[in-house]
Image (cartoon, grey):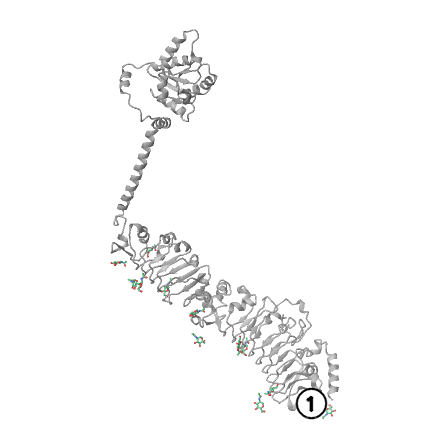
Amino acid sequence: MDRIYVLLLTWFSMTFHTVSSDECLCGDNLVVVKLYRHDLSLNLSDVDEFYDVDVSNDSITDLQNLLLSSLTSIRHRILHLDLSYNDIQQVQRSFFTALPKLRSIVLSANNISAVDKDVFMDARCLQTIDISRNNIEQLPTGLLGKQGEVMRIKKFDASHNQIRSIGSELFHKGLIYLKNVDISYNNMEYFDSWPYKTKSIDQNGLSGCPIDVDVSSLRYNSISAVGYTFNLSHNNISYFKNDAELKPGQQKNFIVDLTFNNLKDFAGCVKALNAETPSDIAVLHLELNNNPWFCDCSVYDVARKVSNSVYMEQARTYLYCHDPPDLQNKSFGYLMENTDKLICNVSDDCPAGCLCQERPSESLLAVDCSMVKTLTELPYRLPKYPRISLNVSGNQIQIIAARRYAHALIRLDVSGNKLINIHPKFFDETKMLTFVDLSNNSLTSLPITLRNLRIPLSDVRVGNNSLICSCDTLWMNEWLKETNGTNLTCTVDGNVQNMDSVTYNSLTCYRDILLIACFVSVGLLCVVIISVAVVYKYRYETSVLLYHTFGVRPFDKPKQEQSMDVEEEAPVFTNDVYISSNRQNPKIIGWVTKKLLPKLENFNKTCYYPPKDDIPGDSIADVITSAMESSRNILVILDDSKLDKDWCMEEFYMGHNIAGKVILVLFDSPTKFEDIETEPIKTYINRQDYIQMNHKLFWPKLEYELSKGN
Ligand SMILES: *[C@@H]1O[C@H](CO)[C@@H](O)[C@H](O)[C@H]1NC(C)=O
Ligand SMILES: *[C@@H]1O[C@H](CO)[C@@H](O)[C@H](O)[C@H]1NC(C)=O
Ligand SMILES: *[C@@H]1O[C@H](CO)[C@@H](O)[C@H](O)[C@H]1NC(C)=O
Ligand SMILES: *[C@@H]1O[C@H](CO)[C@@H](O)[C@H](O)[C@H]1NC(C)=O
Ligand SMILES: *[C@@H]1O[C@H](CO)[C@@H](O)[C@H](O)[C@H]1NC(C)=O
Ligand SMILES: *[C@@H]1O[C@H](CO)[C@@H](O)[C@H](O)[C@H]1NC(C)=O
Ligand SMILES: *[C@@H]1O[C@H](CO)[C@@H](O)[C@H](O)[C@H]1NC(C)=O
Ligand SMILES: *[C@@H]1O[C@H](CO)[C@@H](O)[C@H](O)[C@H]1NC(C)=O
Ligand SMILES: *[C@@H]1O[C@H](CO)[C@@H](O)[C@H](O)[C@H]1NC(C)=O
Ligand SMILES: *[C@@H]1O[C@H](CO)[C@@H](O)[C@H](O)[C@H]1NC(C)=O
Ligand SMILES: *[C@@H]1O[C@H](CO)[C@@H](O)[C@H](O)[C@H]1NC(C)=O
Ligand SMILES: *[C@@H]1O[C@H](CO)[C@@H](O)[C@H](O)[C@H]1NC(C)=O
């Protein structure tokens, strides 16, 4: 008997392996008759009737038996079959192969613990599958048809089972009629992007009747069916997956019910589904209430983005926080308006007993050690963060020493400690500090580096310290005077004074100034004395330079007798300079004509140079004498050549005798003239009363000498 039946089934399945709309009996004008258990023994021979068979609550354990004993004659005309409340443990593919027109199967409340993936493979007309209230643990891929194959399933109910896993391809784009999926009350621990993998056609006016559809022509994710639900409520879902790596698309009008699960990490969930923008999140259509959401800093970015988007109003009741305690029952709307409440406790590197909180709304890490009470120095190490606010108020800290995290400090509260000293380098590093509280300590002074930070004075607290005001710390008074509201005092010679009244004058700081002035004067005096000594030693050079530079002659003795003479009868000179030199030495002639004469012209001196100016024919001696007499100065250029020396000497004598107007220029080194015995030239040499031609100051000296007589 069984064997014959199996053969029959094989034939059935060959006949029905392709099913057209026609074979699923499309149309609304079918006559459907409800049959109960007791009706099945009747002679049902009307070929135009179709049946809705209810054999629920009938202690059925074996489907094969049922088929052979009661359903064989009508199996081609069964559209609906209710097998709920029985003791069925197994469902086989062959059972559904024998019911080719079946549209809905209810297997609810049985004892099924597993379903094979091909069990509904031949039930091509199935629209409703109810396998709820069993002990099913897994829904394998393929149970609802092969990937991409068009299926007519509209409703799938697997609620109230023990389902722990769902094949990632169970829901696929061939399920174009799918409208209700119920997997509530199961043991799922994760949510995958199942709902977004189905495509859907507009079912208006279709009344569930299948048509042949080319799935690839459907716009991806174009679900428009109103009332589409994907129910995953009352599971144990705590995280999201996206195994098929689908991006959320344009889903509309459906609900993914994730209420009553175990979801805590909102940011992690939406991130797993690649939902980065508020609209990405919105198209997921997730219902997320009644989950133990933990609202910490990770929600900050989402809350901020949503609150700036068009979804703001819609998102207000999106989820309610369960933790931390101060945010319990707070809505997403509340979070959007109070993003400062979204904080994270950081434990890595957080000093023992302190509370380290990441606060993205202020983009800083707040470290609060005020409750420790026993710190004796600033924490050595803090969690690495670019901006840190540190509160160590009410501890026992005596010294603020340098710290590596100083550069990151935004706020620092060291009030109510035992501070006596602050390392001056500390405030060199705290370039970002905008608030500092050092009040209620025992500081006697503040490091000047604190002032250099340019913190607004309203954010500098130094009240109730033991500040000592002195001339050295006067900057402090001047600086702090402008702090608002604080009644600052400081100690001057043991007396507490209001800082306002402590001034430069009240501290008589000028005494110091006097002392400094004294030191400076002594120093200056020394410099002057040394200068005078130097000037005295080189007084001639000094005179020359002074004259050359400023045109003054401060060291000249007043020529009183001379001036008397001058008053009586001023001599009349036609030339300023008479130049007496060796007329045979071409070097000297060259020098005189090329250098000396132009230079004298520069000095505005008129010259008499015999080789140029002698009038031929006149007695040479007479000419020379008169020329010399009418010259203010006689410039004698002496070289060491013996030649013509007599002549030279003669001119020298004349010049010397005519009122001592000789200016002696040595054309060679003075050593060459040391052995001269002839007076008065010897005296000139010995007294160094000459100008050396090679001397650095030759021209200034010459100018100086020539100007003497004026
Ligand atoms: C059922 O009806 C058919 C014809 O309609 C008849 O031949 C047959 O004997 C009937 N059987 C019973 C048990 O009444
Ligand atoms: C099943 O049938 C029994 C007795 O016939 C009844 O007491 C019980 O309520 C029924 N259960 C359901 C779920 O219908
Ligand atoms: C369900 O089936 C299991 C075996 O799979 C059996 O042990 C159990 O008794 C059944 N439960 C009921 C209520 O029939
Ligand atoms: C999902 O199932 C639960 C439990 O049956 C029900 O309360 C809820 O309304 C369902 N959600 C939707 C969207 O239908
Ligand atoms: C829910 O899932 C968590 C793991 O996320 C697990 O520890 C817990 O036992 C599960 N609860 C139930 C009732 O299955
Ligand atoms: C949160 O809401 C639930 C139910 O709405 C209520 O029972 C609970 O007391 C509320 N908790 C707080 C802290 O308001
Ligand atoms: C951080 O820790 C404090 C103290 O332990 C606690 O009150 C608060 O709820 C925690 N906040 C978060 C977001 O973890
Ligand atoms: C530091 O902590 C104390 C005690 O909790 C608090 O009064 C004070 O306002 C805090 N300082 C800052 C700057 O927040
Ligand atoms: C000053 O500081 C000390 C020590 O912190 C504190 O005990 C005292 O109350 C403070 N006084 C005032 C007036 O703030
Ligand atoms: C001091 O307070 C006054 C009034 O409260 C305010 O206008 C002024 O800006 C404050 N000055 C500083 C330096 O904080
Ligand atoms: C100093 O501490 C006392 C008590 O601890 C407090 O009342 C006072 O406001 C503090 N003073 C300052 C300037 O912070
Ligand atoms: C400042 O302190 C002095 C003396 O302690 C007091 O008279 C004055 O009222 C205080 N001023 C303010 C603004 O607190």
Image coordinates of residue 369 in percent, x first then y, are 39, 65
Towards the viewer: 43 or 660: 660
Residue 323 vertical position relative to residue 546 in the rendered view, above or below: below
Q: Tell me: 208 left or right of 656.
A: right
Mark 1 — residue?
69
Q: Quadrant of ligand 6?
A: bottom left
Q: Tell me: 357 left or right of 180.
A: left
Disc 1 residue lies near ligand 1 with CB under 8 A: no
Q: Is residue 574 visible?
A: no
Q: Secondary structure at mark 1?
A: helix
Question: The N terminus appears in which quarter of the rendering?
Answer: bottom right
Q: Is residue 83 visible?
A: yes
Q: Tell me: 529 left or right of 41.
A: left
Q: Quadrant of residue 101?
A: bottom right
Image coordinates of residue 403 in percent, x first then y, are 42, 58
**How many badges with numbers are in the image?**
1
Q: Quadrant of residue 82?
A: bottom right
Image coordinates of residue 578 in percent, x first then y, are 39, 15
Image coordinates of residue 190 in percent, x first then y, are 56, 73
Question: The C terminus appears in which quarter of the rendering?
Answer: top left
Dot 1 amino acid type: Ser
Q: Residues within 10 Å of mark 1 (few under 14, many from 20)?
A: few
Towards the viewer: 318 or 403: 403
Residue 108 vertical position relative to residue 373 in the rendered view, above or below: below
Towards the viewer: 639 or 606: 639
